[in-house]
Image (cartoon, helix red, strand yellow):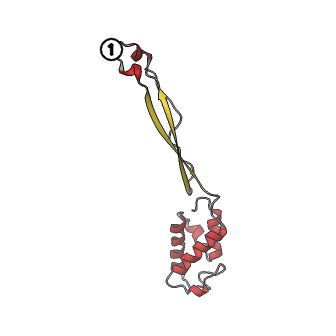
């Protein structure tokens, strides 16, 4: 019997926002031995059809700094211990907003959840303000 070989039928590209599908139809001819058999009329008149799907993912140029900043400000404003009037892009968590170290860890965890990333502890300790968080997220290509 002949072996059917093809390229990968299902491909994943980097995750993003828009998804589109492409379908291909592949026609396979039955082996010649089956066609020449007098008792086998089914294979002499039919072809096997295999439908494959390819899924492509694409991002629309990543996140803008303005988008990142507004999302982080919304996260900080939603925190119970923060006075919303004091929140701006230059606000420091401890000095300006009055958050202690545990509160800062909780804010960073909320940022991780919102942007679907994981921030290592060493780098999370360096995030002490909204500007630091925006700079860090802007560097990450996997944030969305």
Q: Is residue 107 above or below residue 22?
A: below
Residue at x-position 51% and y-position 80%? 79
Q: Is residue 39 above or below residue 8?
A: above
Q: Quadrant of the C terminus?
A: bottom right
- Number of other residues with Cα within 10 Å of mark 1, as a class: few under 14, some 14 to 19, many 20 or more: few
Q: Is residue 87 above or below residue 25?
A: below
Q: Quadrant of residue 88?
A: bottom right
Q: Quadrant of residue 125?
A: bottom right
Residue at x-position 59% and y-position 81%? 93
- Coordinates of residue 109 in the picture (x, y in percent): 51, 71
Residue at x-position 55% and y-position 83%? 99
- Coordinates of residue 141 in the picture (x, y in percent): 62, 59
Q: Nearer the viewer, residue 34 or 100?
A: 34
Side (left or right) of 93 relative to 9: right
Q: Residue furthest left?
A: 39
All told, the count of numbered labels is 1
Residue at x-position 40% and y-position 13%? 36
Q: Determine which residue is flagged by label 1.
A: 39
Q: Nearer the viewer, residue 70 or 112?
A: 70
> Secondary structure beneath disc 1?
loop
- Coordinates of residue 100 in the picture (x, y in percent): 54, 83
Q: Quadrant of the N terminus?
A: top left
Q: Nearer the viewer, residue 54 or 92?
A: 54
Q: Residue furthest front?
A: 45
């Amino acid at each position: 019997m002949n072996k059917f070989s093809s390229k990968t039928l299902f491909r994943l590209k980097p995750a993003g926002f828009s998804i589109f599908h492409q379908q291909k139809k592949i026609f396979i001819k039955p082996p010649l031995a089956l066609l020449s058999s007098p008792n086998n009329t089914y294979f002499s008149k039919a072809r096997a059809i295999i439908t494959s799907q390819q899924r492509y993912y694409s991002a629309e140029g990543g996140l803008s700094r303005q988008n990142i900043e507004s999302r982080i400000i919304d996260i900080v404003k939603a925190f119970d211990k923060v006075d919303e009037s004091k929140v701006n892009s230059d606000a420091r968590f401890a000095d300006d907003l009055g958050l202690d170290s545990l509160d800062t860890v909780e804010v960073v965890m909320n940022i991780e959840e919102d942007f679907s990333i994981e921030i290592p502890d060493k780098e999370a300790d360096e995030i002490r303000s909204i500007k630091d968080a925006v700079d860090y997220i802007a560097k990450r290509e996997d944030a969305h």
